[in-house]
Image: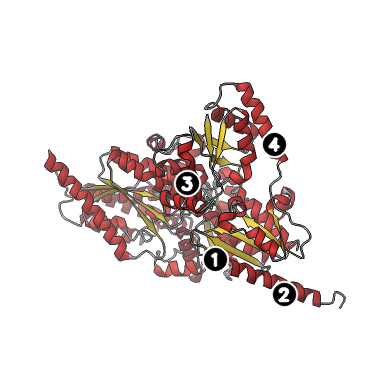
Amino acid sequence: MKVTFPHMGNIYLAAKALFDGLEVEYVIPPYNSKSALEIGSLHSPEEMCLPFKLMMGNYIQALNQGADTIIIVGSCGPCRFGEYAELQMKLLNKAGFHADFIAIDAPSDIGIKELFRRLNILTKNSSKNKFEKIQVLYDAIKIMNLIDEIEELAHKYTGYERNKGTCKTILNNCKAEAIKCNNPKEMIQLLKSYKAKLNHIAIDINKDPLKIAIIGEIYTVIEPFTNLYIEEKLMDYEVSTKRSLSPSWWVKNTALVPLKINSLDIRKASKRYLPLYIGGHARECIGEAVMALEDGFDGAIQIFPMGCMPEIVSKSILPTISKDHDFPIMSLVVDEMTSEAGFVTRIEAFVDLIERRRENELSRH
Amino acid sequence: MKIGIPKGLLYYKYHVFLETYFKEIGAEIVVSPDTNKEILDLGVKYCVDEACLPIKIFHGHVAKIKDEVDIILIPRVMQLKEKEYICPKFCGLPEMVFNSIPNMPKAITNPIYANNNTKLYKWAIDAGKYITDDINLIFNSFNRALIKQSAHKTGIRNENFEINIALSGHPYNIYENFTNMNIVEKLNKSGVGVITEEYLSDDLKNINVKKLYKKPFWTFLRENYGFTTYEALEKKVDGIIYLSSFACGIDSVVTELIKDEIGDFPFLILKIDEQTGEAGLDTRIEAFVDMLERRQENESDIPSHG
Ligand code: SF4
Ligand code: SF4
């Protein structure tokens, strides 16, 4: 058995550690790229949303590299994502790819027993005992959290660094090194050292950088290829960014849903504009926009794939928030056709806009 | 009190219930006119660009009547069946409308969980409060509205046609003749009978649905997938026409699953948006009907006993 899984931000690091730890063979699909998207689009219905197509690309590229078992992530709320697995399995079969599927669904849908049965298929070839398996799982989650924290720090400190580019270099080195680790413990050590490094860079606390919140559809905000590496670009402009949606946020949120104590801050902040969960992460998007303005951010950028149903609802609400609070919000829709040039122009124009607003404000005082 | 009811989206399925209920509790009802060019234009003007046509049209209906009424109904339908969901845009419909159309009157936006009558009754109380305090009146009106709705048969089943097709798609695409350009009439005129999903029982719909790896969580997917695949695999009809909204996330999944199940059974997907031209639509329908006719002739040429 050779397992593979779809990309989503840095999740491949945790997955790598998990399989290394379990001593299960795996293939990490090539990073998302034009060719992954092309292959994926070729085998996807035209009007499917972008994440679907990229995941198809990941699966096919991994199968071509020898993977034979695909971990497919199932439902998470009333949106198309919940039907991804069904359709992807059918399309792959039809296209002549032979693979086994392990569909991971929320336990509330399939029952905890069934979930464990499915997970067991994954670990049955592992020579590790039950205790060791749990330890490995624990380590993988730790890795996921660590890399999310590192990213968050880098995106934040980038506006305060004394030497331009420090944060970006540390972040990129960190990822490049982490992928070379061969066991979970080693990776945890490495990540910890990078986190410490970030916490000790030379910063200028007198700086007051521009701050932008990145909000929108979860896959396209997390997966840098889809948003044309917007966070990295903003780092180049020395803008601090914050994005609340991350794999670790998702895991925590999902775990807390049955208790109804998930994301209390988001619920509170979104109440006035979108009082209910409507599917996808529309409510998070609205809540984060409100939280960003309350926290003194200079603006927010919403990103979502073409045709994304919940984010279209958010997009109609955001202008009101923007108007009510005089808070700049820009919406960027991404799809296969998004041109890099047009995208960069819009980002630059937005940064310019908030910069000028700052200056005006200062000159008024 | 004048209450406005926009003639868009699920109005086509539940108008009997809504109209009866509000009339009985003593409101004066203003229903927007059938969709027309003006309503479409209003919708396109106010609604976010990225939205699908049915949502834009709904905005148009609201904009059309909002100034004539004291209060307007924007049904926030959350669920129709237990453990099944519907499109996120229904759940966020009031927010979309309120943030897109200026100078809105008061509105009834309470969430509608139509999956059980207790929950629906709760909606009736919340919505009725805007009109009357008389809880007995609310209770009786609610029951009468339910009875009337269930006695009201929706759906199409033409009889005595040589060629028949299953017509599938969102109710607002099937029953709104402005956007579908009178498709049922057109088909009838070319000698094609139509049957819709309402005429197939849930049990029969579920036959193929059960074969899916995952239980579908959209009510719409279960119904339309179950209906079309049953009609096709049991050869109850000669072809399927699916009216799909351009950029509808749900349609993109449903049509693909149907395709996968029915193999080379005749299947025509008509995508509608504000740019759809009547001539183009006609050509595609004609070509499809021609093909069905030819198939029928060919089939009758084959002798039934070797
Ligand atoms: S939230 Fe948007 S991108 Fe995600 S499945 Fe739904 S429509 Fe697709
Ligand atoms: S189900 Fe499709 S057509 Fe209907 S509102 Fe949602 S996206 Fe639009």
Circles 4 and 1 on the same subunit:
no
- Does mark 3 have its CB less than 8 Å from ligand 2? no
- Could you tell me residue A126's position as x and y percent? 53, 57
Residue positioned 34% across, 61% down in the render: A228
Residue positioned 31% across, 43% down in the render: A322
- Could you tell me residue B146's position as x and y percent? 67, 35
Chain letter of disc 2 in the image = B
Closer to the camera in the image, A34 or A7: A34
Q: Secondary structure at mark 2?
A: helix
Q: Pointer 3: what residue?
A: B59
Residue positioned 70% across, 39% down in the render: B150
**Label 2: few (<14), some (14–19) or many (≥20) C-alpha neighbours in 10 Å:** few
Q: Pointer 1: what residue?
A: A68
Residues under numbered marks 4 and 1 in contact, where contact means CB atoms less than 8 Å apart: no
Circles 3 and 2 on the same subunit:
yes
Q: Which dot marks residue B148? A: 4
Q: Quadrant of residue B254?
A: bottom right
Closer to the camera in the image, B125 or B80: B125
Residues under numbered marks 2 and 1 in contact, where contact means CB atoms less than 8 Å apart: no
- In the image: residue B25, left or right of residue A48: right
Closer to the camera in the image, B116 or B137: B137
User: Which of the two marks, 3 or 1, is nearer to us in this view?
Assistant: 3
- Could you tell me residue B194's position as x and y percent? 70, 58
Among numbered discs 4 and 3, the one appearing first in the sequence: 3
